[in-house]
Image (cartoon, rainbow, N blue to C red):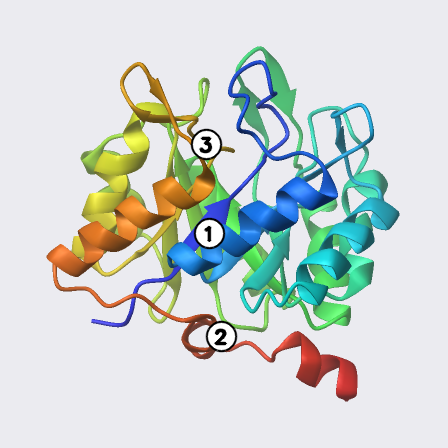
Amino acid sequence: MEKLIITAAICGAEVMKKDNPNLPVTPEELTAAALAAEQAGASIIHLHVRDQQGQPTQSKEVFARVISLMQEQGLQAIIQPSTGGAAGMTWQERIQPVYLLPEMATLDCGTTNFGDTIFVNDLPLMRNFAREMQRLDILPELECFEVGHLYNALQLRKEGLLNKHLHFDLVLGVPGAIKASLKNLLFMVELLPEGATWTVAGIGRHQLPLATHAILLGGHVRVGFEDNIYYQKGELAQSNAQLVERVAKLATILGREIASPAEARTILGLTSSKEKNNN
């Protein structure tokens, strides 16, 4: 079984300081959180950023500042900007961070009832994202909140818009989308094409149970404040690193080695940012 890639989703667009005061939002806080998560075992940092008021933004300039600070501080993990942004943003707003040429970026694979809002990702929008990532040689992480989203991703591949390694993030437990359960996870995994890799992101209290199953099934794991702000019932997590460390320890107990950033790049078929920028 290949080594386990742990993704730390350190901020998100929905969680606020009032929900958990330990949430990182400033460039300095995000950098410290990323470094600590990497030290705990994360090899991918899934990145959202905030403006000076602490609100979600897709500003290329803000992403550039945060990513530069992380790299200056010696972060080796894959930095994976979100192109999801927040509900209501246009695709032109959302896609801005890909022009910083990250190794990976997310590509949401379908429209979702997201709590009380609608997160719009129709096929024309998805094609726009896929074309730009293909043109810029960026690996998309294919975000799937429903079973039908898997088929949307496969449609993009059929159209020749996904010609790199296929890596899926199966997000279970978003209110309004597919429920978080082992049965639903197994169903989605069975539909994945041969050779694809996958990560599971369980929302809220489902984060740890689904992470455990992913470790055993040969998948990969996403944890962090974007998806869950609690360490256990009634106890707020102290940091993203605390959530990463728990999964890393669990994987060790279950006999699964943790992938380093370099090993994660090999598993995902990535060219490092340094190599890309030198070409």
Tag 2 residue: 265
Q: Is residue 257 left or right of residue 78?
A: left
Tag 1 residue: 37
The location of residue 209, given as percent across then percent down, is: 22, 36
The location of residue 121, given as percent across then percent down, is: 65, 36
Real-space CA distance between mark 1 and mark 3, rounded to the nearest whole angstrom: 15 Å
Mark 1 or mark 2, whichever is nearer to me: 1
In the rendered view of the protein, which quadrant contains the C terminus?
bottom right
Residue 139 position (above or below residue 130): below
Mark 1 or mark 3, whichever is nearer to me: 1
Tag 3 residue: 227
Quadrant for residue 74, please give it: bottom right
In terms of sequence position, does the residue under pointer 1 or pointer 3 come before the other?
1
Pointer 1 local density, CA inside 10 Å: few below 14, some 14–19, many at least 20 = many
Real-space CA distance between mark 1 and mark 2, rounded to the nearest whole angstrom: 17 Å
In the rendered view of the protein, which quadrant contains the N terminus?
bottom left
Circle 2: element type: helix
